[in-house]
């Protein structure tokens, strides 16, 4: 800011605040390029199947040991980018107009969704069995040891849901813990679990895959090195012509952000309601934490509305291009992973490193054996394909599962890929009560113990269904 000759205050484009946001974006995108270069040039990284976005985030973490670079990174901005990218990614995926080719029967899809929920539950049980005793017998803030009794529920959020939900619930738990006088770094705790989950899903998955290949139990197949898209992928008929004054991608991005604006209006409306003590402390934080869920809901409504306008002849162009929506969603999820990993602060992990380590190890073991056991049961003819796709998803994201699956089923000849996509709806329906429990648990130690008991009951019910005697 400076004064002109006429005495009017003028803002200079050289001012730091003009560039501060862009500098954070520069760091994230440069990290993606660096991660891609490493993955392409280093054979170990390429064979490990670690996502490029995670490599980018880890590169930023390494550079944060350099104090001058650490000062550049805006932790709050990275957390905000993670939060919004999660919702934008799900909105983009939910707006896609084309249905998935369904080679999976309804029973298998429901069972896959039940497996997803069952894994969330066992991860939550394992997590609480670690953090509750550590809170009672290990916690000593004066000695630099701190943990929140409900912190174990970060395991299904970090492993099962990924960085976005780990951040959302980490923020809620950190705030609730602070109100109770507990210095729990929930944000860094959750994001660290998510980052470690990506590594476990990729590295453990590849190691086990190679062990099975060595024992001749499965065959690693060559992937097609060049996927060619046809004109139909880019233009699926009756879309905006290229001669239009606005680019198709601009329209697609505008629809995505318009949908997210509806989500914001809805959450703001709920936030202004008087909901009493329970509503203020439990419901409202969950409303903002579920931005991805509301994104899916409103995107589905927007898609149905656009389809109805076309059927009635009020809209003559197809504005929802599946290829472009996939690209927008993929970009959002990549940014989410990089920013979520970059937001981790090592200094905040000093008091929780032991429970974090125990949680990640125990969670990985429980997830591995449970998913394997159930997969061999519900996918009798393609057990390993089903296992690797689900294990990758339930320690990272769906893209991790697809990456592992491509190593043994590059052309998606088994229904495993379809199961992964179609299970989302039954998993969301069955898993929603569990998300409500996650909002109830941190209110008190007794609430957490009640939640643990309910999770054990739900886990029993889920497995009675999964291991029932099948009727052919």
Image: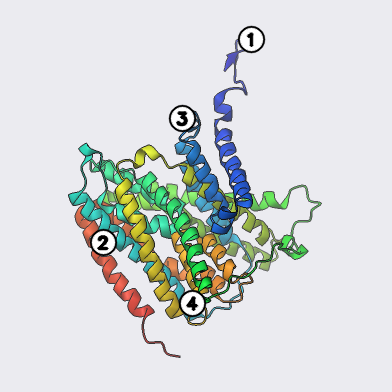
Residue 117 is left or right of residue 41, and the answer is left
Q: Earlier in the sequence, mark 4 or mark 2?
A: 4
Residues at marks 3 and 4, CA–CA distance in whole angstroms: 48 Å
Which residue in the structure is indicated by mark 4?
A: 383
Which residue in the structure is indicated by mark 2?
A: 451
Q: Quick one: SS at disc 2?
A: helix
Which residue in the structure is indicated by mark 3?
A: 67
Residue 161 is left or right of residue 149, and the answer is right
178 or 411: nearer the eye? Answer: 411
Residues at marks 2 and 1, CA–CA distance in whole angstroms: 67 Å
Q: Which marked residue is nearer to the observer: mark 1 or mark 3? A: 3
Q: Position of residue 432 (x, y in %)?
A: 38, 64
Outermost residue, front side: 214
Residues at marks 4 and 2, CA–CA distance in whole angstroms: 32 Å
Q: Position of residue 445 (x, y in %)?
A: 21, 53
The residue located at (58%, 78%) in the rendering is 103
Q: Earlier in the sequence, mark 1 or mark 3?
A: 1
Q: Earlier in the sequence, mark 3 or mark 2?
A: 3
Q: Indicate which disc residue 6 carries.
A: 1
């Amino acid at each position: 800011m400076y004064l002109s000759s006429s005495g009017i205050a003028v803002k200079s484009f050289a001012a730091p605040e003009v560039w501060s946001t862009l500098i954070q974006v520069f760091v994230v995108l440069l990290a993606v390029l660096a991660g891609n270069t490493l993955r392409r040039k280093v054979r170990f990284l390429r064979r490990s199947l670690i996502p490029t976005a995670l490599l980018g985030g880890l590169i930023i973490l390494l550079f944060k040991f350099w104090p001058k670079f650490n000062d550049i990174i805006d932790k709050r901005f990275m957390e905000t980018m993670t939060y919004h990218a999660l919702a934008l990614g799900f909105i983009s995926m939910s707006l896609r107009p084309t249905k998935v080719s369904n080679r999976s029967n309804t029973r298998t899809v429901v069972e896959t969704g039940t497996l997803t929920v069952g894994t969330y539950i066992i991860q939550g049980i394992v997590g609480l069995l670690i953090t509750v005793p550590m809170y009672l017998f290990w916690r000593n803030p004066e000695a630099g040891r701190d943990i929140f009794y409900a912190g174990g529920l970060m395991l299904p959020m970090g492993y099962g849901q990924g960085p976005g939900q780990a951040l959302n619930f980490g923020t809620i738990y950190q705030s609730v813990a602070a109100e109770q006088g507990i210095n729990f770094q929930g944000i860094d705790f959750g994001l660290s679990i998510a980052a470690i989950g990506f590594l476990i899903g990729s590295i453990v998955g590849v190691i086990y895959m190679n062990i099975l290949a060595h024992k001749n139990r499965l065959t690693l197949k060559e992937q097609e090195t060049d996927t060619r898209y046809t004109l139909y992928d880019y233009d699926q008929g009756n879309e905006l012509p290229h001669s239009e004054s606005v680019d198709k991608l601009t329209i697609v991005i505008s629809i995505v952000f318009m949908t997210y604006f509806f989500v914001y209006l809805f959450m703001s409306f709920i936030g202004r309601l008087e909901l009493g003590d329970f509503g203020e402390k439990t419901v409202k934080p969950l409303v903002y934490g579920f931005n991805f869920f509301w994104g899916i809901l409103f995107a589905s409504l927007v898609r149905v509305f656009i389809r109805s306008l076309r059927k009635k002849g009020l809209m003559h162009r197809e504005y929802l291009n599946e290829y472009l929506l996939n690209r927008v969603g993929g970009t959002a999820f990549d940014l989410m992973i990089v920013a979520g990993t970059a937001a981790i602060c090592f200094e905040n992990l000093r008091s929780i490193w032991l429970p974090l380590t125990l949680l990640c190890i125990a969670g990985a073991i429980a997830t591995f054996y449970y998913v394997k056991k159930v997969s061999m049961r519900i996918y009798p003819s393609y057990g390993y394909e089903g296992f690797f796709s689900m294990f990758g998803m339930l320690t990272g994201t769906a893209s991790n599962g697809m990456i592992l699956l491509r190593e043994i089923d590059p052309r998606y000849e088994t229904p495993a890929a379809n199961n992964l996509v179609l299970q989302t709806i039954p998993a969301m329906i069955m898993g929603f009560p569990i998300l409500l429990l996650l909002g109830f648990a941190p209110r008190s130690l007794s609430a957490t113990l009640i939640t643990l008991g309910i999770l054990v009951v739900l886990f029993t019910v889920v497995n009675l269904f999964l291991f029932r005697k099948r009727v052919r």
